[in-house]
Amino acid sequence: EIIEGVEYLHKNKILHRNLRPSNILLKQGGINWVKIGDFGMAKMQLYPDQSNTQSAGDKDYRAPEVHVGSKYTTQADVYSIGLILVELFHININKYDTYSELKGIIGQMLSGVSGQRPTCSDILNQIRAPPIVYDKDQVQADTNGLAQLDKNDYLKAYYTHKINA
């Protein structure tokens, strides 16, 4: 939902410029669990090729191009989301584990070259694409994971809403 929210902003020509965990608000229960807050540094991007150079946002979540004062676009927000996801999932990018697909997407988001980062729409397409599974054991593991959803009220409510939406 974080990526969907930022995609909405970008489609409406808005750069957030201060995405960080404290600006991601979580709502308990119901739909639309994630809210993006603090638009004090947000800026309209009136033209697709318009770049900004003003330093903005929390220094720990800035894209490299923002940090050094170079021109930046909506891809700077994508970089910030990548950093938030690393924290959110406690991901060690250098370790092989069950997050390998997510790590691939995050790795793209954290590219040091702005033009190599995917857009929010690209990321959502990757996330929503059905998984390609060649290993029977992996399919079994996925089935076991689904069974676990039924045991967690928070996840059950969240994914039931997503499936029925």
Image (cartoon, rainbow, N blue to C red):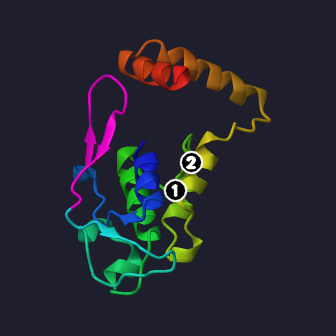
**Secondary structure predominantly adopted by residues drawn in magenta:** loop
Which disc number belongs to residue 80? none
Residue corresponding to mark 1? 120
The range drawn in magenta is 24-39
Measured from the top left, where is residue 142 in percent x and y?
63, 26
Does residue 80 sit above or below 165 in this rendering? below
Picture residue at 75% right of the left edge, 35% below the top: 133
Residues at circles 2 and 1 in contact by the CB criterion of under 8 Å: yes
Q: Which residue is mark 2?
A: 124
Visible residue check, residue 122: yes
* Residue 161 in picture, x, y percent from top left: 46, 22
Q: Secondary structure at mark 1?
A: helix
Which amino acid, mark 1? Cys
Image quadrant where residue 6 sits: bottom left
Of 30 and 46, the residue lying toward us: 46
Q: What quarter of the picture does the N terminus occupy?
A: top left
The picture places residue 84, in percent across and down from the top left corner, at: 36, 54
Residue 91 visible in the snapshot: no
Q: Nearer the viewer, residue 119 or 153?
A: 119
Looking at the rendered structure, the kind of residue marked 2 is Leu
- As drawn, is 127 to the left or to the right of 60? right
Residue at the spot 37% in from the left edge and 15% down from the top edge: 153
Q: Is residue 61 left or right of residue 96?
A: left
Q: Residues within 10 Å of mark 2 (few under 14, many from 20)?
A: some
5 vs 37, left or right, is: right
Q: For the point 23% across and 67% down, which residue is it?
A: 41
Q: Position of residue 18 (x, y in %)?
A: 27, 64
For residue 88: magenta?
no
Q: Is residue 136 above or below residue 95?
A: above
